[in-house]
Image: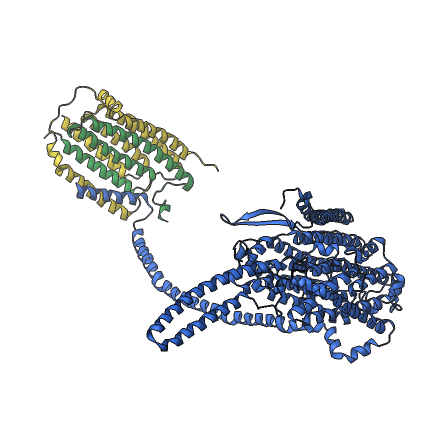
Amino acid sequence: MGIGLTHYLILSGILFAIGLFAVITRRNAIMVLMGLELILNSANINFIAFSRFGGINLDGQVAAIFVIVLAVTEAAIALAIILNIYQNYKHIRIDEINKLKE
Amino acid sequence: MTQENLLMIPEISVVILLLPLLGFLFNIFFGKRIGRLSSTIATGIMGICLALASYIAFTKFVYYPDNGMIQLKFDWFTLGPGNAVSVGIGVDNMTAMMLVVVTLISFLVHLFSTEYMRDDKRYSRFFAYLGIFTFSMLGIVIANNFLFMYIFWELVGLSSYLLIGFWYEKDSAANASKKAFITNRVGDLGFFAGIMILFFTYRTFFFDDIFAKILGDSLHGIAPILPFNSGFWLTVAGILIFCGAIGKSAQFPLHIWLPDAMEGPTPVSALIHAATMVAAGVYLTARVFPMFTAHALLFVAYTGAITAFLAATIAITQNDFKKVLAYSTVSQLGYMVMGIGVGAFTNGFFHLVTHAWFKACLFLASGSVIHAMHHAMHHLNDHHTDPQDIRNMGGLRKTMPLTYLTFLFATIAISGVPFTSGFLSKDGILAGTLAFAQLTGNWLIPIAGFGAAGMTAFYMFRLTIEAFHGVPKTKIATQTKENKFVIVFPLVLLAVMSFWFFYSANPIDASKGWFASRMKAPATSVPTAYQFRFLVPEERLKQEEEAQEKLEKANVDENTEKLKKRIHEELEIAYATGQENRDSVEKYKQEFLKNKEEAKARARHPLMAKKSMKDGSGEKEEFLTVFEEKIEEAHLPAMFISVLIAGLGILLSFTVYQFKAMNSDNLANQFGLLYRLSYNKWYIDEIYDASVIWFTLNFSKVLGLFDLKVIDGIVNLTAWVARLAGQATGIFDNVVVDGLVNLIANVTGTLGSIMRKFQTGRVQTYIGLTIVVVILLVYFLA
Amino acid sequence: MLEALFYIFAAMIIGSAAVTAFTKNILYAAFALLFTFFGVAAIYVLLSADFLAISQIMIYIGGILVLIIFGVMLTTNVSIVDIKEGFTGKTSFIIAGIFSAITCIFFIYLAFKMPFINHAPKDVKLPNDSTIKPLGKLLMTNYLLAFEVASVVLLIAIIGAAMIARRHDD
């Protein structure tokens, strides 16, 4: 059988699950960020797969472009925040930064 | 009013009115800064006022003696459409005379005070007060309406209060000023009520309008308007307005404040409490004379007579120099009021003027004496002796000759010795009372009048002899010295003013003099039914009688016609039916006659006149009323009696005090009860203390108790109920409302603590949960 | 041939992603991420999205990944502290594992069961031309507003990041 939409969807699903796992379990903020990038990549794979097979043509690719743009901004700001956190806490262990609980 | 220019009389009178106000304002604001100059300014202003007042009096008396009141009227303020309140000023002969009296005495008192008050620390303040007093007094004088009159009336009360209490550091002075003010308020209340009755009825404050409306116009068929359509209420209004005079002119029973008012500086006593302010009441009585009904006049006359007699008896035994003069003033005021009350309007007002001169003279002389005594005491370093007690004086004749002479002359004048002004006016009043008694039978009034005249002569000479004759009773008296020119000059001037020739060429009869001819009694406005018949102008009587006869005739004619017709009918029936109806015809006839009699009786007014007056006494045309004619008749007997009585009084006084033929202490012991009554002023103050004041105090105590027990009880009860309700509400609040709130809070709390488990504060948990939800959404929605 | 390439790259993506997720060494994770991105770019090529494949390599690998490594270097004291970073805890590890597995299964389930899967064309003709031109047209026409907004977002992100990361000396 040829490689169809389903294959790509399965691939992106697995990638998403791995990213989710990283996001949830990692203590280091930067590792969480990496997990997020994985998730975003899985989403992009979906978009492009749909653009290839789903009949939405290039619109899917345009969406992917915006996702990449947002990923970049997110990465930049997230890292800035992480740096800020580091300056305040001298660490970036995200499970210990639970001020929100109070 | 005529169209001629009236020689600026109203305008100048306004200037006279406002100048003292200017002086007051100047002295009250800048007095401290200019110091001694304030008296110069105030006296100068009074001098100008005096000159202007003399001008007004001259023009009025010479050029317009018969012009009635020269008036200025204007709308002051408007209460809704057509309800303008008009006020104004007016000058008639009486006003012109009063202007001269007030300004002259005020001027002299100012002059006197420059020396008398020299050492006072509130020197300029004193002159400011004198200024506002003069302003208010002039206001009363030139007011031509009740509203202005009342305003200035109260202003006079205020300035009197300020001046009596001028030395307010002394308790007695402060109390006296309060007493004067409050006592005056009692009278003013009546005055105000009277004004309200009149305004309610006539919708105007002007004297002339009110009098005109009371009078009506029988020629043109305009009926008189009376308050509440009854003569009774007119009487009430008159008496109420007279109440103001009772207060201000210190008539019985409100006379108690005047002797106490002597606590004020002596010039003040001379100005306010002898010559001018207390005369305001008399002036008011004279002003509203036309509206006094017969009953009201009787009331006025009796009030005056009682006052004159009572005060004279008290004056006999007093030892304080000024107190004697004060009671003498009260007595003389009683005279004036009595004079006006009996209808001797001219003489009552005449006495006001003459009394103003010699009483001011007496007071200023007493001021001179007290001033000298003060200086002597100061000289001797004595600060305890009473400088006003005549028992500390004696022999002042030698040390103060000018004061003595002027005082003596004023005493002669007040005693009613011929060739003085006092004789003229007093005699006129006494003649009036005699005539009144003849016409109405009220003999008590002349008896009181003559009695008071005798006593006046007695106590005035007692005062003169005790103070000035004999040997000095204390060392202080020997040390007294005659005062400076500014003190003596007013005395001399005032004493000279007490000669007869200022008022009439004839030294024993003033009724032909210029004064009497300028101050004719105004014709009464009261309808004939409510007035003494002898006070109503003959002409009006005639007119009314004619009108009445016409009416009566018409009535009778009508009735006659009716009855004739009836009788005719009855007769016809009687003839037709027979004998038995004859009786009823007879009855109708009698009825007819009775009706006629009653109608005739109604036409007459036998209400007041004890003697039925003869109509048409045409031979003496110059008399306006019958009363004036009677006064003329009573003149000679009154003169003889009064001279006799005054002579007796003087003689007795000399016997007892000069020649010591009788011991005064023995006399006092012999007439113990009478002496004590007189010495203690008939216990009137004590009676007030025991009655009115006691009642007021206890009533307020009762009210206080009521307040404490009942009102406070109610308040406390309310508070208690409120507290109880509050507690109930509180319990409800605690249990139910708070319970609900707590329930909600607990539920929320519990839910919160459950939810809290999810709030780890960790980003990762949130992400995981979000994704779970998203997945569930996708699963269930897609 | 294409199938083989797909499976190779899919395996590479999943493998390197797993390393990223499970390794304790943060630097390893970063390098594994590099391979993941690269694999994703290859998948894009397989999906005939050439422009996106290049963008993926340039932006993700050249931009984000470098950024991440900078972040690692700036926040971790490499010389003293062990560079390895652990997980949040065993419990959460297990829960997250189960949860991720369920998610994965759910997605796979969806990939098979979604109705549109059957309507999707089995074999699509590959475009001969580059996608750059049509993409550019689309961005300048249909998606112009989004494009402009994205530029503003980027600008704000630059300013914001600089602003937040700035050292607060006060």
Q: Could one spot residue C3 in this view of the protein?
A: yes
User: Is residue B574 toward the left or the right of residue B365 in the image?
Assistant: left
Residue B780 lies in quadrant: top left
Front-most of residues B125 and B553: B553
- Compared with B4, B476 (above or below) is below
Front-most of residues B494 and B488: B494
Residue B262 locus on image (x, y percent): 74, 63
Q: What is the display colour for chain B?
A: blue
Look at the image and name its color scheme. by chain
User: Is residue A87 toward the left or the right of residue B190 in the image?
Assistant: left
Question: Which chain comes out yellow in the rendered image?
Answer: C
Q: Residue furthest left?
A: A1
User: Is residue B325 toward the left or the right of residue B194 in the image?
Assistant: right
What residue is at 31 percent from the left and 29 percent from the top? C149
Residue B224 lies in quadrant: bottom right
What residue is at 45 percent from the left and 36 percent from the top? C168
Residue B545 lies in quadrant: bottom right
Q: Residue furthest bottom?
A: B670
Q: Could one spot residue C25 in this view of the protein?
A: no
Residue B573 locus on image (x, y percent): 35, 71
Residue B173 locus on image (x, y percent): 72, 63
- Tell me how many marks there are: 0
User: Is residue B540 toward the left or the right of residue C110 in the image?
Assistant: right
Quadrant where the image shows the N terminus of chain A: top left
Residue B244 locus on image (x, y percent): 63, 61
Q: What is the display colour for chain A?
A: green
Front-most of residues B360 and C25: B360
